[in-house]
Amino acid sequence: MMKYIINRLTIILPLFFVCFYFLLGGNSFAQSNDFTYHWENVNGLKIFYRAAGNPSKPTIVLLHGVPSSSVMYQGVMELLKNDFYLVAPDYPAHGYSDVPPASYPFTFENISNTIYTLLNQLGIHHYSLYMQDYGAPVGFRLAVKHPQQIDALIVQNGNAYIEGFPDAQDPNGDLERYWRDKNKKYENNWIDSYRKESLVLPSQRNLGTGINPDRRNMDAEIMLKPGRLDLFMQLWFDYGNNVKSYPQWHEYLKKYQPPVLITWGKEDNYFTVPGALAFLKDVPRAEIHLLNGGHWAVAENNTAEIAELIESFFRRAVVKP
């Protein structure tokens, strides 16, 4: 009888201690990789960010494109959260972040400064950058100013070379003329075009099965709020300063030779494949993958493929996750 009791205790006691551990808060460990959602006060602005993973793992800061927000990274973060600590902020006036006051210069330089302050406040001082679209000018400004903090660069259809930006190659083209004189007709045409496009129902867009209409609807809902399109045109006008900054970004790449992973949707007609290949001029060891996808590859058909490439890249070229 005593032997039976002892045998039962060897089973029950471990279960008791496991239950006691979770009652004391051990469940926080079990859920450490789950998503969390935050607003951080950054110089009077509430900046939203989503996070996933364990802070003890290598950190990746994911910088979104326009007109989107950090929501575009939800899928890839889900796939990477077991091996990385992932932080994806919304820029001011994007996603769930505050719209800044008129006194806030709505430029890439200032947005980059805001993101840097956010990371500082969160105690994030070493990280890799995932940069897509507008994420590239925000991220390269961080890298140029604080190169010692950058572990690696992941670039997905985020341009840094004129070779990959056909619309900016003609000095007499509409875009270059707009950047020179801020042509109001160009702005109005762009705004009208976006409004008309946003009125098209998802069922009429012929979206592929890998494209979630929820994200596109959320993007449009934010962009169509009063004053937002005019604000975003300020940022598009400032994009001309990014092209002028390309040589500075190239110098950073040449000097520091960070590990670089390029995952580029080759069907992107705006930021084209030559922009991906041009990285090899300054970082000959850059790893380039041309994907069967478009500008929003990470949020659409190539989510799992990009996650696998990141995992492999970090194991081989950066640090083991």
Image (cartoon, rainbow, N blue to C red):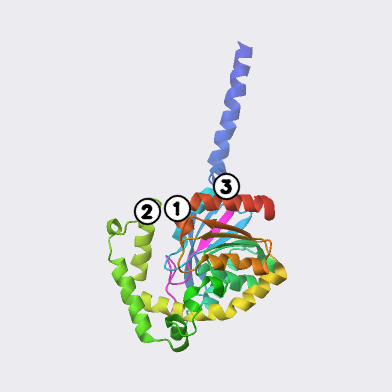
Q: What residue does disc 3 label?
A: 82
Q: Nearer the viewer, mark 3 or mark 1?
A: 1
- Are discs 3 and 1 less than 8 Å apart at CB? no
Foreground: disc 3 or disc 2: 2
Q: Amino acid at mark 2?
A: Gly
Q: Which residues are magenta?
A: 82-101
Q: Using the image as rendered, state which of residue 196 and residue 118 is in the foreground.
A: 196
Residue sitting at x 57%, y 73% = 161
Q: Is residue 262 left or right of residue 296?
A: right
Tag 3: amino acid? Asn
The label number, if any, that marks residue 301 in the structure image: 1
In the rendered image, residue 12 lying in the magenta stretch gets the answer no
Q: Earlier in the sequence, mark 3 or mark 1?
A: 3
Query: Which mark is first along the chain, 1 or 2?
Result: 2
Can you name the residue that lies furthest to the bottom here?
A: 181
Q: Report if the CB atoms under discs 2 and 1 are less than 8 Å apart.
A: yes
The furthest residue to the top: 1
Report crowding for label 3: few under 14, some 14 to 19, many 20 or more residues within 10 A (C-alpha): some
- Marks 3 and 2, Cα distance to the nearest angstrom? 29 Å
What distance separates the C-alpha of mark 2 from that of mark 1? Answer: 8 Å
What element does badge 1 sit on? loop
